[in-house]
Image: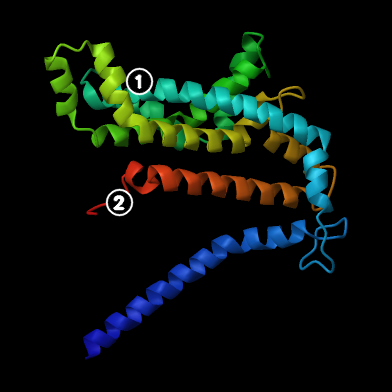
Amino acid sequence: MRRGLSTQILGISGKLLVGLILAFIVLPAFVVTLAAFNDRAILSFPPAKYSTRWFTRALTYRDFQTGLWNSLVITAWASTIALAVGTGFAIALKRYSFRLKGGLEGVLLSPLIVPHFTIGLGLLVLATGIGAARGFPVVVLTHVIVVLPFVIRSVYISLQNIDERLELAAASLGARPGRVLGTITLPLLAPGLVSGWLFAAILSFNEFTASLFVTGQATQTLPVAMYGYVREFADPTLAAVSVIYIAVTATLLIVANTFLGLGKVLNVEQGR
């Protein structure tokens, strides 16, 4: 009886702890969401009156519009390049054995632990040395380096779920390596490729720290434009932008999970 009671208490305590952690995580988003509808031109909580005018300002502010366009262009290029490069590296790391394989994998995954301001500062110094500082190619390269580990991870997990006998069967029937890749491997990798691109796009679009070093006035992304705005104004416009960010990101993840099954792609569903 005592053991059963102790188990119940531990179970209830665990659920309560998880609930408190989730509430702690969600609370800032809840506060920001309410603050975005404040009628006054100053951040306050809770709002005395509600208004949507800050959402209108967020959508019509010129620097935000320019930053949004730059972010979309940079995100499209960076995520696509990262997908192509990351897929090649993932296949090489999964299917082949060669010298310094562990070292190469460590270098490719190093952006996960190296501070992004270090990456941004390093690329700024390098780009300045060759006269290409703060241009779009440098910004895209920075984002590719930052998001590449996530693409490699996604594709690598998908490779683990592929039955290699299907590729061997196709090869034994006379299919050339390129045909096997195009008709067997890549279609089976589709969920990992799409989720890898999606994660890369979300991370690239939200990247701020490294972008702050390598962007200029003409190439600034939306997060950098938001940083410039908060230094000059203290109204709820940024809260409105944050709400839009949260809504769009959540929608993309829900859609991806519905059609791709992110748990299976990221190998977090075991024994099902």
In the rendered image, which residue does mark 1 sit on?
88
In front: 240, or 89? 240
Gap between marks 2 and 1, in whole Å? Answer: 25 Å
Q: Is residue 36 toward the left or the right of residue 120 in the image? A: right
**Mark 2 residue element:** loop
Q: Provide residue 242's location: percent of width, then percent of height.
A: 68, 49
- Residue at 36%, 48% in the rendered image: 263
User: On the image, numbered disc 2 is attached to which residue?
Assistant: 269
Q: Residue at x 53, y 44 (%)?
A: 252
Q: Quadrant of the N terminus?
A: bottom left
Q: Is residue 142 at all visible to an observer of this figure?
A: no
173 on left or right of 248: left
Q: Is residue 147 visible?
A: yes
Query: Which amino acid type corresponds to the residue marked 1 in the rendered image?
Result: Gly
**Is mark 2 in CB contact (under 8 Å) with mark 1?**
no
Q: Please determine whether, in this image, residue 261 is positioned above or below residue 86.
A: below
Q: Position of residue 121 (x, y in %)?
A: 61, 26
Q: Quadrant of residue 229?
A: top right
Name the residue: 25% across, 52% down.
270
Q: Residues within 10 Å of mark 2 (few under 14, many from 20)?
A: few
Earlier in the chain: of badge 2 and badge 1, it is 1
For the C terminus, the quadrant is bottom left
Q: How is the image coloured?
A: rainbow
